[in-house]
Amino acid sequence: MKTAKTFVKLTSCPFARRDSFLAFFNDPGGSEIFGAASLWLSNTRGGSTIGAVTNRQIKLEIQQNGRAIASVNSTTPYEVIQESDHGQVRYCIGGRNFVRCLGTGLQGSSLVMRPTAPRGFLAGASFYDLMDGTWQLGFGESRMRLIPITGKLTQEGMQFRMTPGEDGVIELVFEEYTLDPIPGDVHSFPDYEACLADVKKDFDSYAAAVMPELPAPYEDMRLQALWTTWSHTNDAHEDDLFRHTVVKMMRGVFEHISGWQQAMQAICLSKDVRLAWSILASCFDYQDVNGRIADIYDNQTLPKDTMKPPFQGVALKWLMKNRDLSGIPAEEKKKLYNGLKKWTEFFLLCRDLDKDGIWENRKAGETGWEDGPYFYVGFPLASPDMNAYLEICMEALAAFGKELGEPDADSWQQRADELLDKIVKTFWDGERWFAFNATTKKAAKSDSLPLYAALILGDRLPRDIAEKSIEYIFREGTFETPFGLATESLTSPLYRGGWCQGSVVTPVHIIFPLAFEALGRMDLAKRIAKEYCDLLKSTGFYHFHNAISGEPSIGSAMGVEKTLFWSAWTSSCYLFLADRYLRG
């Protein structure tokens, strides 16, 4: 009986590599237990559909006498190892579009590959003999070619079998492609050890550039955090939609790029300035003619009619203050400036229905807090946090424009000052922040933490407002938990424990430490950073947690998936908080 030795568990995060759409999954609700584990080679192109399992294309089994035998999945940062009592099979994502497979000790055993059968009119047309010793398989939104190197590849009905010789060794390449291969054109691939060396070089250089070390209490999870973000990262290529380096949110359950998440990633990963700049610049690749930035897009789908909060100004202003951007070419800076300018103007052009200089969200999905309790007043909804982000966009345009010699730089600072004044007069009632329906003017005065993200304005806010806001947040038994800040007060009648109804979630723990630091309260930034990093160190990089128990919120959160996979948003947050706030 074998026991899994895991760098990361496939029940927490599918196994992938930077810049590849190939990934290894377990069954939905799978297990690490010997005999209950499963393994799938999967295609993560084209995003995913929440509530449906779409990312499992080829099931991989070690078999004897035509029956699957018990196995378990081990992982290192560089490979997946499928282990049984009758041999093992190792898998390494050796490049952007191929997996190298090496099986040893398989005397009497074989590797069986079972492609997912297509439905409807495609049934029965999922694979072809290419008549050169290789086979073509359907593979989600691309194609897969099975290329045997050592051992015998045979088709058996709707499955394929790799049988070893007397030495018990098999070698196989899985090659993914989007264009039909030229018959007979089977090029060579590096051997297994060369693939391992390539992955190791790639990951190790990334780790050294992004976060070479962390304070001792958080160092033991540094590589897992780095690997999680690295494995969710895709670079730009002519054959896909990405024009800059981007970071996906989750493998499997949410294979998408999110605009305000990219802005936060740019801050979190900014020790590598060039990487951070590319991620931030990606936000502006697919603006519509009015300047809107889409909430989400993926490798196959252009932006839809969605958006998220304008956090890009926060990221640019933070990078200008904390990192050296002198190495960024002037033309790239100019392009980002123009993109941010169009994005900022979009809100007053398209999202200010009553033309009072305060913009409103049209629906919950635009806010980033999709189930916020304060939405009970309905939409269009004006809120202080959203307008605070826009004010900082204007500040960033003023500072960046001045650096670039833009003639309108001064006017942006004037507009920022005017909006700041409106935010204070419109959303502060003397004791607390509130949101309101722009049509009915009904005010929402729920105990909702996102409203207090207006503190990101820092020392631009009047001192008494900042002090009262901090006092409100840190009332005993309300927002602060042993695990960080909850999105809704635990004493609120609207507390439900959902995403924004009282859970401990990732974006809160980027926004509020930045806000406390901007207010000169590093003590509070460090306090919240420690609570959240200690939680993640204990549970792993799950996207949100129960505020009372600290348990990861998994299960039905993403439909038929039984676990909510680790999030690159969360792993990057861990790296940033531990590095910036928990040293000494």
Image: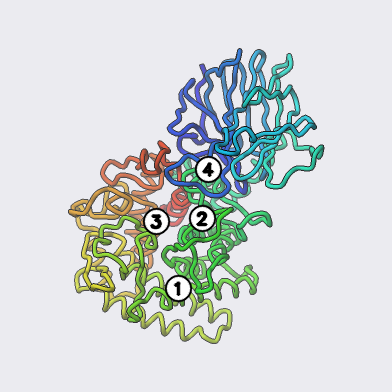
Q: Which mark is residue 257?
A: 2
Image coordinates of residue 284 in percent, x first then y, are 55, 67
Residues at marks 3 and 2, CA–CA distance in whole angstroms: 15 Å
Residues at marks 2 and 1, CA–CA distance in whole angstroms: 21 Å
Instruction: Report whether 100 appears left or right of 501.
Output: right
**CB atoms of marks 4 and 2 within 8 Å:** no
Q: Which residue is mark 1?
A: 393
Q: Nearer the viewer, mark 2 or mark 1?
A: 2
Query: In front: 504, or 100?
Result: 100
Badge 3 amino acid: Pro
Q: Which residue is mark 4?
A: 223
Q: Which mark is residue 464?
A: none
- What residue appears at the point 61 percent right and 12 percent down from the top-left corner? 65
Figure quadrant of residue 164: top right
Which badge, 4 or 2, comes first in the chain's sequence? 4
Residues at marks 1 and 3, CA–CA distance in whole angstroms: 18 Å
Q: Nearer the viewer, mark 1 or mark 4?
A: 1
Figure quadrant of residue 108: top right
**CB atoms of marks 3 and 4 within 8 Å:** no
Residues at marks 4 and 2, CA–CA distance in whole angstroms: 23 Å
Which badge, 3 or 4, comes first in the chain's sequence? 4
Q: Is residue 214 visible?
A: no
Which badge, 2 or 1, comes first in the chain's sequence? 2
Tell me the element at label 1.
helix
Q: Is residue 581 above or below residue 2?
A: below
Image coordinates of residue 74 in percent, x first then y, are 54, 29
Tell me the element at label 4.
helix
Instruction: Report whether 412 appears left or right of 271.
Output: left
Q: Nearer the viewer, mark 4 or mark 2?
A: 2
Tell me the element at label 3.
loop
Residues at marks 1 and 4, CA–CA distance in whole angstroms: 33 Å
Mark 4, residues whose alpha carbon is within 10 Å: few (<14), some, or many (≥20)? many
